[in-house]
Image (tube, grey):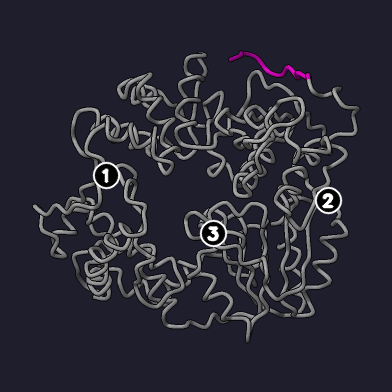
């Protein structure tokens, strides 16, 4: 926890909190969010008020518990739900894992079934997996009943008629699965934490507290949002987060902060990096249209230049991370992969199955029967363009090479470089960071400037949010790498420094040993 004198913004938050008004605190990257919440908690203790801090995961909750006074209970929404509902299902909580198709068979899905879905064929395994994902998506929603929009889209069957056909096939089994989960002592569907969270939310729970602090409120599942906002009649609600870091919308999360009826406050002084990186971050905040702009710490020197030996390389995609792992291993560096290599290994094994003429159970690829079919989808179907790097990677290196590379990964504490997706990097920081090459520029417009160069296309807001997360992970050196295109894009002006144009265009900062 920081021991500095509170900034004027932190002081403003501690003055607003005792009034009991609902608060929304926009806390930019590295701005001392936990420190500020601890200040609020100590203010509440002096008032004799008790509250709860609701974190995204247990690790964050445990860290907060060390900073907060005992009058504030730190935990997750799942912990609240477990105390109320989940403990009644303890007998089902640790059931052994089994293949999804076996669960599907227990729900009545014929093992020999095969249904044509447009040009694709959906097997019992694909349907079983879709049924279980439908239940999970329902559990993360604020809805009271399972509905067609909970059925996940499948690769190769994205059109509306095919989605409707898939929903008609899936929903009866999904509803049967949800009914099975209501039995506390036994059932055929493996009982997960999201299941009792949903059951708890459907009971309209009242959380006993004088105030509630919701962290990472910019990425809140609707089921948690529903429960949290319902407490506003008896408890003071404080939403904390950074709307510019709302990067999980694709997973159903919502930015609860935007539009919430409460007093708007902000934390904009970053204690992670200096003014130069704050200026770079502000370019992306401007593109996003965020409500805050950051100020760097004058005592910290953060440079923008070339990182010859970065501590971390941040990638846009899992496939990009795979490319970077191979590149770093080829440079004889000890490489760690944030979150481990299982997600990438699963993709590589799925590709290997398709190359061998076998269908795969991987949720991204399970509707494809052959590698050639997937390659055609990636090359020619607009919905499959994001899979093209995977296809090219496998075609170039082969799945055996990819799996061998993943087997050579090191633990982070002994690695020379950590490779991570930007999503995995959220909440983390490193001294020297390089942005990987798979952060590509938006496509150009068809029209051209007078000099014949193409007019750059608009920057997707979700991509800008991810870029903002990526660039704000560095403390001392940021290598823009794959995001360098922003320097020549109209939305990247004005330049993020006070230097004259051109002075920083070719700037290389040499740090550390080794190289690419």
Question: What segment carries the magenta color?
Answer: 506-516
**Mark 3: which secondary structure?**
loop
Element carrying mark 1: loop
- Give the residue at x 42% y 82%: 203
Rendered position, 105 above or below 386: below
Precedes in sequence: disc 3 or disc 2 = 2
Report if residue 98 is visible in the image.
no
Q: Position of residue 85 (x, y in %)?
A: 38, 76
Disc with the residue nearer the chain's start (2 vs 1): 2
Q: Main secondary structure of the magenta part?
A: loop
In front: label 3 or label 2: 3
Q: Which mark is residue 500?
A: none
Whether residue 507 appears in magenta in the rendering, the answer is yes
Question: Residue at 22% across / 38% down in the picture?
Answer: 369
Numbered badge on residue 366: 1
Q: Nearer the viewer, mark 1 or mark 3?
A: 1
Is residue 378 visible in this depiction of the protein?
yes
In the rendered view, would you say 469 is above or below 79? above
The image shows residue 134 at horizontal and vertical percentages of: 33, 62
Label 1: how many Cα within 10 Å (few below 14, some 14–19, many 20+): many
The correct choice, above or below, for 114 with respect to 183 in the image is: above
Mark 3 lies on residue = 56
In-image side of 213 versus 27 (left or right)? left
């Amino acid at each position: 926890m920081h021991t500095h004198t509170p900034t004027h913004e932190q002081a403003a938050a501690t003055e607003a909190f005792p009034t009991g008004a609902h608060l929304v605190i926009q806390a930019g990257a590295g701005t001392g969010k936990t420190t500020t919440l601890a200040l609020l908690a100590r203010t509440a203790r002096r008032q004799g008020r008790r509250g709860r801090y609701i974190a995204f995961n247990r690790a964050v909750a445990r860290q907060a518990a060390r900073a907060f006074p005992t009058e504030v209970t730190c935990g997750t929404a799942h912990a609240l739900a477990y105390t109320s509902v989940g403990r009644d299902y303890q007998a089902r909580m640790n059931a052994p894992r089994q293949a999804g198709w076996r669960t599907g068979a227990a729900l009545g899905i014929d093992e020999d079934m095969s249904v044509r879905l447009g040009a694709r064929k959906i097997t019992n395994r694909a349907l079983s997996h879709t049924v279980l994902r439908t239940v999970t998506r329902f559990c993360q929603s604020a809805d009271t009943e399972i509905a067609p929009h909970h059925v996940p889209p499948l690769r190769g069957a994205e059109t509306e008629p095919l989605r409707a056909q898939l929903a008609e096939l899936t929903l009866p089994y999904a509803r049967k699965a949800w009914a099975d989960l209501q039995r506390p002592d036994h059932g055929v569907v493996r009982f997960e934490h999201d299941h009792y969270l949903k059951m708890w939310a459907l009971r309209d729970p009242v959380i006993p507290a004088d105030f509630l602090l919701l962290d990472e409120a910019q990425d809140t599942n609707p089921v948690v949002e529903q429960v949290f906002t319902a407490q506003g009649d008896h408890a003071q609600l404080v939403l904390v987060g950074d709307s510019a870091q709302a990067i999980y919308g694709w997973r159903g999360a919502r930015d609860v902060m935007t539009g919430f009826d409460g007093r708007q406050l902000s934390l904009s002084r970053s204690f992670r990096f200096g003014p130069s990186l704050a200026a770079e971050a502000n370019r992306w905040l401007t593109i996003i249209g965020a409500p805050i702009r950051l100020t760097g710490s004058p005592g910290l020197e953060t440079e923008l230049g070339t990182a010859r030996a970065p501590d971390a390389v941040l990638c846009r995609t899992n496939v990009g991370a795979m490319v970077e792992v191979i590149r770093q291993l080829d440079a004889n560096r000890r490489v760690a992969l944030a979150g481990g290599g299982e997600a990438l290994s699963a993709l590589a094994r799925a590709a290997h199955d398709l190359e061998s003429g076998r269908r795969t159970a991987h949720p991204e690829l399970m509707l494809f029967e052959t590698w050639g079919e997937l390659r055609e989808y990636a090359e020619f179907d607009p919905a499959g363009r994001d899979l093209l790097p995977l296809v090219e990677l496998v075609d170039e290196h082969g799945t055996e090479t990819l799996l061998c590379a993943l087997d050579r990964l090191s633990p982070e504490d002994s690695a020379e470089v950590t490779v991570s997706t930007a999503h995995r990097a959220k909440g983390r920081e490193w001294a020297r960071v390089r942005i990987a090459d798979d952060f590509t520029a938006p496509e150009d417009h068809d029209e051209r400037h007078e000099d014949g160069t193409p007019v750059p296309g608009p920057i997707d807001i979700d991509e800008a949010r991810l870029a903002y997360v990526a660039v704000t992970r560095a403390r001392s050196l940021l290598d823009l790498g794959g995001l360098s295109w922003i320097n020549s894009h109209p939305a990247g002006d004005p330049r993020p420094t006070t230097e004259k144009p051109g002075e920083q265009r070719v700037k290389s900062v040499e740090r550390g040993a080794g190289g690419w």
